[in-house]
Amino acid sequence: VADADTGLIEMVNSLPQIDYQSGAIEDPKATWRCPTGAIVWLDAGQFDDKNRNMTEGQKRYAQLH
């Protein structure tokens, strides 16, 4: 959030919310400061299409405890 253009990212309930309509420019540099590498820049084409046609019963979801 600190490295993004003003108005692009807002924290909502401790999660970043990106406002693509703000007119600010999205840039991967906003993720570079993360010391663990847990925050990464995602672009189109990074996900496999094999899961797109899965039924609801076949999908797996992360669970937070």
Image (cartoon, rainbow, N blue to C red):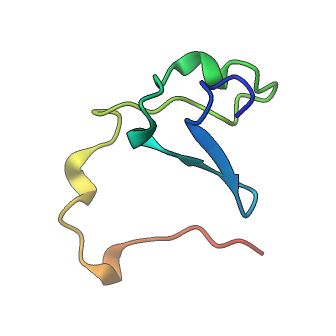
Q: Is residue 64 above or below residue 20?
A: below
Q: Position of residue 18 (x, y in %)?
A: 52, 44
At x 51% / y 70%, what residue is drawn? 61
> Position of 56 compared to 2: left or right?
left
User: In the image, what residue occupies the spot 76% across and 27% down?
Assistant: 34
Please tell me which residue is depicted at 68% across the width and 18% down the height of the picture: 32
Asked if residue 2 lies left or right of residue 27, the reply is right
Vertical order, 13 against 40 (above or below): below
Location of residue 38 with respect to 59 vertically, above or below = above
The answer to whether residue 1 is left or right of residue 26 is right
Residue 52 location (% of width, % of height)? 22, 59
Quadrant of residue 60 within the rendered picture: bottom left
Q: Is residue 33 left or right of residue 16?
A: right
Q: Which quadrant holds residue 38? A: top right
| Quadrant of residue 64 within the rendered picture | bottom right
Q: Nearer the viewer, residue 27 or 57?
A: 27
The residue sitting at the left extreme is: 53
